Amino acid sequence: MNVYDSERMTEALSAHGYAETGAVEDADLVILNTCHIREKAAEKVYSDLGRIRQVKGARAASGSDTVVAVVGCVAQAEGSEIVRRAPVVDLVVGPQSYHRLPELIARTRSENRSLVETEFPEEEKFARLPQRAPSRGVTAFLTVQEGCDKFCTFCVVPYTRGMEYSRSVADIEHEARALVAGGVREVTLLGQNVNGYHGAGPEGRSYSLADLIRHLAQIDGLERLRYTTSHPRDMSDDLIAAHGTEKKLMPYLHLPFQSGADRILAAMNRKHTAREYIDLVGRIRAAQPELALSTDVIVGFPGETEAEFADTLSVFAEVGFAAAYSFKYSPRPGTPAEKLSDQIPDEVKADRLARLQSVIERQQALFSQRCVGRALPVLFEKPGRRPGQLIGRSPYLQSVHAKAPAGMLGRVVPVEISAFGPNSLAGVIRPE
Ligand code: SAM
Ligand code: SF4
């Protein structure tokens, strides 16, 4: 979602004469778009600001001004504390206000003081942003839903991104069509809780995510649809059915389960049990037997015992995942879990994480191995590292490289998979 937000900020600023540069030394304006989900991500902001302070100092010595903005969820959570800790910062802007960046930059320049904007504004951010600029690639993200009211006890999202909000179908369709006109062939619909989507449809009734997918699938030239991230409790029957019937919906699903122990799931306020998750996966796989499943897991939530960690490993053994993201529990300011007394020592968390990650690597390798010898439709996205090579994605979101002419960029081509590595597959184009 931050990648998407950064693109939209870049587009909003392009309309005011800004152009992107890869070198911070050349930048009149530096924006750090930040993540507050774990402590490590939040702390990285301050180490980056230390480096930016030096650049700003050097530029000032040669007569150039630099405006430094901290945007996103760290900005929302820490507000003016950021300017106190890092006076190099001129602007602090929460994720719901970045459409106001051009105006706020002008103000900080003219008033020559730092500004902090962390309200959840009444006005609609998306309505205020300029049209999507012609795309830079074959795949694109498209935010359809923001915020979350699930209040998992470990998570900052409800506090930093606010309550759940769904964009209208017309607005999303408009953006999707603009992306496709600019060359995009695959769109990933984004939301912190994307399958809770319930936006106003064209006929006045509310659309579910499945309705939205069916609607967008009618756009000519749009070949693939994906969505992320979903909550198990919002996996409705019509969405499950769409996995079986919508050809453009890729057979890949990211469905976090967080923990395999029911006591921990209850303490996390996830409102489902491990068995309910496993049964749900069974129903989705019945609709789409090809499904590649990925997940998020937290180890070392307060009070997690060794036996409860073993329950998490059991879910892996029973379900079998194509990919997974795993995290050490990170206490986040203002969340209920932070106040729990039985925090787990870091070395225990690190040990559990290492054991879990070796299971994940094995399962991922097994999934990749099963692809060898099959012809997978690959959407080529960009040139590979070697001359004459292109890189694309399989339906299961694996990176695939193959020798292919540049003219195949943006096309879905059958590739016979011949080998796999830890992060990618290799293959040979099948004659069409
Ligand atoms: N909405 C999604 C869901 O319900 O699963 C997750 C969104 S969150 C931005 C992405 C992932 O970060 C979560 O699934 C969780 O595994 C992880 N995460 C969130 N808060 C965390 C924390 N305090 N410590 C460690 N990992 C965390
Ligand atoms: Fe955070 Fe996801 Fe839980 Fe919402 S559903 S509080 S985003 S982990």
Image (cartoon, rainbow, N blue to C red):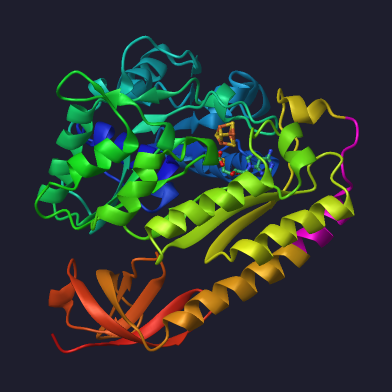
Residue 120: image location, x then y, percent: 45, 14
Q: Residue at x 14, y 49 (%)?
A: 180
- Whether the magenta-drawn stretch holds residue 100 is answered as no
The residue most toward the top is: 122
| Residue 152 position by quadrant | top right
Res. 250 visible in picture: yes
Res. 27 visible in picture: no
On screen, residue 119 above or below 364 = above
Q: Residue at x 25, y 53 (%)?
A: 246
Q: Is residue 132 left or right of residue 93?
A: left
- Of residues 107 and 46, the one drawn nearer to the viewer in this rendering: 46
- Magenta stretch? 341-354
Task: Name the quarter showing ligand 1.
Answer: top right
Q: Looking at the figure, which quarter contains the N terminus?
A: top left
Q: Residue at x 66, y 48 (%)?
A: 275
* Main SS, magenta residues: helix
On screen, residue 326 above or below 332 = below
Counting the numbered discs, the total is 0
On screen, residue 65 above or below 225 = above
Residue 128: image location, x then y, percent: 25, 21
Q: Is residue 250 left or right of residue 320?
A: left
- Whether the magenta-drawn stretch holds residue 350 is answered as yes
Residue 289: image location, x then y, percent: 41, 65
- Of residues 340 and 76, the one drawn nearer to the viewer in this rendering: 340
- Of residues 287 and 309, the one drawn nearer to the viewer in this rendering: 287
Q: Is residue 309 left or right of residue 171?
A: right
On screen, residue 288 above or below 110 = below
Q: Looking at the figure, which quarter contains the C terminus?
A: bottom left
| Residue 156 position by quadrant | top right
